[in-house]
Image (cartoon, rainbow, N blue to C red):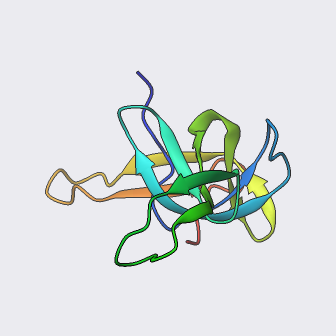
Amino acid sequence: MSKIKLKKGDTVKVISGEARGQQGKIIAVDTKKLRAIVEGVNMISKSEKPNAKNTNGGIVKKEGAIHISNLMFLEGGKTVRVSKKSNEKPAEKEKKASSKKTKEEAVK
């Protein structure tokens, strides 16, 4: 199983599928299914029963999950490949995302 290099709050672009070319922020990531929900992308219609929040019920549009292999990290308006590297010292177990092309820390 591959590691997920994208996380909640990252700005991504869809590189394949029906929503190709669209971009948005990641709302949630499902690590077991390797899927992410991106804001405003892959909208699906879901029928809901009336409840306290929505008294009428009806058809509601919401974001659907997209496989992470179809997403690419956006930095400065361009797509970049991301690598995760940890610090040299074992005491600092913080992982930083960096751009493969520029070798600089990714701006999030």
- The residue lying at 32 percent from left, 55 percent from top is 87
58, 7: nearer the viewer: 58
* Residue 95 visible, this angle: yes
Furthest residue toward right: 21
Q: Quadrant of the N terminus?
A: top left
Q: Is residue 87 above or below residue 16?
A: below
In the visual, does 35 lie left or right of 71? Answer: left
- The residue lying at 44 percent from left, 50 percent from top is 29
In the visual, does 66 lie left or right of 29? Answer: right
Residue 60 image-quadrant placement? bottom right
Q: Quadrant of the C terminus?
A: bottom right
64, 10: nearer the viewer: 64
- Residue 34: x and y, percent? 46, 34
In the visual, does 27 lie left or right of 102? Answer: left
Residue 24 image-quadrant placement? bottom right
- Residue 11: x and y, percent? 63, 65
